[in-house]
């Protein structure tokens, strides 16, 4: 069994990120960077110039508004909310092992993603006019998904915690034998 | 200001974030983006063919496959994009925001990349719902933004290439703390032995020893007392991506249809068990299509012939099983019965390998006129279809007659035919 190294944390840990020791690269990498950079810039400019060729001024303004809103919603709301949720989970999963905590977080991540998709589906369903699109009962499907996630997560966490408990017992017994 | 941004970075700190994590997620996302781009260009080329465009009629499910992959990889990109952006979020809060002209250009290109990517995947998804709440045309915007995104992606790779190369593989060697990173079960033992904080630290802090940047330094260490590992996070992202793919790809691929619970389309629905994109009511075509005097006009070099429905039905009929695949990703294989279009062309004295201009009865619409390249005209499976799944075509499926050809986007399978002009 591998023994985890307990890394000491210096009292005065640097506030900034540790420097990345980037290997030295030769002219090949430099050339690749230049080629990729020029190609990328050229392609991006081609796309940017193509937009006004098919979109009118009002449509371009609308596009800019949507581009800005997308970033603001993501960076200003979605990520802070997920960070808050993560902070809350830190307290909630305090007694669980890391594997169990990961399973719980993974289930919540999958459920949250599907809920986001379902929210958009339901909104679209409320304005849909076509009879053969958005026909399913997505809310019910989402409820079943959450139920399946909850049950699956509970079973997996139970098994993981039980296995960890057994290992702990064995470790405790062997420690006692060593001392005696 | 530095203190403020440091404080904010501390709030969002996580021991999971590292350059290695961003590189792994970036690889996954670059793959789905490139698949999306390639399949999207193919679809665009079929609809707006440049002079060099190649057209494939075999396998007959070629477009069903490429467009299904396009939509599915686009949907898979959503959780991957969110995860990738989460992994680099503290970079947003770095101060000063601009250090030089080059740095400003780099941040500007990343801003464009991020905003365009978010808009592209979300509007692409909503487009499959036939919902258009934005003030710009979807198809043109989607096409040009795809170029912007691919260009920005290449530029981003160029800027980050040294970091990508340095973190492409897990670090190896004597200092490889991966060797000493406890397995989950070991970590749990350590948790029980010395408290959860120590065990999680043992998992998280080696990231720094591995010379992967643990963003936000001491703040991350503070947060490292609880949470999860990079592998756990990647596994969760993989499971989430798998869930959205499994839950939606059944609209494109029949073998996944039983688990299709979250796609906008379901196979086997709609009139005659085939979904409909544009209804007769939407196209305002009902009275024209149901007019008893309807006839299909076929013309070639000044000659023309009008074929009534009974005359068309009296011609030799052929039945083929062909998929109809839409740009929104859904598809449905069905039995189509009708007249081979090459027979009609030859009856007018033209070569089967002729381009056609097909006109619909629709009074207006982007696809009222359709050009059919010769390769489809000559194909024996291309029909003027009169029946679907053993029944006369439903009005919403193009009654009295429609085009069905192998390997073409659904929008080019013209419904409610008015005329065929041999070019």
Image (cartoon, helix red, strand yellow):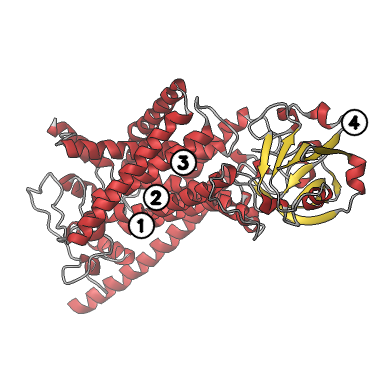
Say if B224 sits above or below B192 in the image.
Answer: above
**Are discs 2 and 1 less than 8 Å apart at CB?**
yes
Give the numbered dot on residue A180. none
Disc 2 vs disc 3: which is toward the camera?
A: 3
The Cα–Cα distance between marks 2 and 4, rounded to whole angstroms, is: 65 Å
Give the numbered dot on residue B293. 4
**Callout 3: helix, strand or loop?**
helix
Which chain's residue wears label 2? A
Q: How many marks?
A: 4
Residue drawn 33% across and 66% down?
A: B185
The Cα–Cα distance between marks 3 and 1, rounded to whole angstroms, is: 25 Å
Give the numbered dot on residue A105. 2
Which chain's residue wears label 1? B
Say if B182 sits above or below B213 in the image.
Answer: below
Q: Earlier in the sequence, mark 3 or mark 1?
A: 3
**Callout 4: helix, strand or loop?**
loop
Disc 2 vs disc 1: which is toward the camera?
A: 1
Q: Earlier in the sequence, mark 3 or mark 4?
A: 3
Badge 3 is on which residue? B121
**Are discs 3 and 1 less than 8 Å apart at CB?**
no
């Amino acid at each position: 069994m591998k023994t985890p190294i307990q890394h000491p944390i210096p009292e005065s840990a640097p506030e900034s990120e540790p420097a990345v020791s980037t290997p030295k690269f030769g002219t090949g990498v430099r050339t690749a960077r230049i080629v990729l950079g020029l190609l990328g810039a050229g392609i991006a400019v081609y796309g940017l110039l193509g937009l006004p060729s098919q979109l009118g001024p009002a449509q371009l303004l609308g596009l800019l508004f949507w581009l800005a809103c997308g970033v603001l919603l993501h960076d200003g709301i979605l990520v802070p909310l997920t960070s808050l949720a993560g902070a809350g989970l830190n307290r909630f999963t305090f007694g669980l092992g890391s594997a169990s905590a990961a399973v719980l977080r993974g289930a919540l991540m999958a459920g949250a993603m599907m809920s986001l998709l379902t929210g958009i589906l339901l909104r679209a369903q409320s304005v849909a006019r076509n009879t053969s699109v958005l026909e399913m009962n997505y809310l019910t499907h989402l409820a079943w998904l959450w139920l399946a996630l909850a049950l699956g997560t509970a079973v997996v966490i139970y098994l993981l915690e039980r296995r960890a408990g057994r290992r702990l017992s064995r470790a405790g017994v062997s420690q006692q034998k060593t001392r005696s | 200001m530095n203190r403020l941004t440091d404080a904010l970075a501390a709030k969002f700190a996580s021991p999971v974030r590292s350059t290695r994590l961003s590189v792994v997620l970036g690889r996954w996302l670059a793959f789905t983006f490139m698949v999306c781009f390639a399949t999207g260009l193919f679809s665009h080329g079929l609809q707006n063919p440049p002079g060099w465009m190649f057209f494939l009629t075999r396998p007959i499910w070629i477009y069903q496959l490429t467009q299904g992959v396009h939509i599915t990889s686009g949907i898979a990109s959503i959780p991957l994009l969110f995860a990738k952006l989460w992994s680099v979020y503290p970079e947003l809060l770095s101060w000063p925001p601009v250090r030089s002209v080059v740095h400003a250009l780099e941040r500007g290109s990343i801003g464009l990349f991020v905003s365009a990517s978010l808009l592209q995947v979300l509007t692409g998804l909503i487009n499959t719902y036939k919902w258009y709440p934005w003030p710009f045309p979807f198809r043109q915007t989607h096409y040009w933004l795809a170029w912007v995104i691919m260009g920005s992606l290449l530029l981003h790779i160029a800027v980050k290439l040294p970091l990508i190369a340095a973190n492409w593989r897990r670090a190896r060697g004597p200092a490889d703390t991966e060797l000493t990173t406890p397995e989950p079960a070991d970590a749990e033992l350590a948790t029980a032995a010395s408290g959860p904080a120590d065990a999680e630290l043992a998992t998280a802090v080696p990231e720094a020893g591995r010379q992967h940047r643990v963003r936000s330094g001491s703040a991350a260490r503070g947060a490292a007392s609880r949470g999860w590992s990079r592998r756990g996070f990647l596994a969760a992202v993989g499971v989430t991506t798998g869930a959205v793919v499994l839950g939606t790809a059944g609209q494109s691929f029949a073998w996944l249809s039983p688990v299709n619970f979250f796609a906008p389309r379901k196979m086997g629905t709609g009139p005659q068990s085939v979904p409909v994109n544009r209804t007769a009511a939407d196209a305002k075509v009902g009275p024209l299509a149901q007019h008893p005097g309807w006839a299909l006009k076929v013309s070639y070099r000044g000659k023309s012939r009008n074929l009534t429905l009974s005359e068309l039905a009296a011609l030799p009929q052929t039945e083929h099983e062909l998929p109809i695949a839409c740009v929104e990703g859904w598809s449905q294989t069905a039995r189509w019965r009708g007249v081979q279009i090459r027979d009609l062309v030859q009856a007018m004295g033209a070569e089967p390998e002729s381009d056609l201009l097909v006109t619909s009865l629709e009074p207006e619409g982007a696809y009222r006129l359709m050009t059919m390249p010769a390769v489809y005209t000559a194909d024996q499976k291309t029909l003027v279809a009169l029946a679907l799944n053993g029944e006369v075509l439903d009005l919403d499926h193009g009654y009295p007659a429609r085009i069905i050809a192998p390997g073409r986007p659904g929008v080019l399978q013209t419904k409610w035919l008015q005329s065929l002009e041999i070019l």
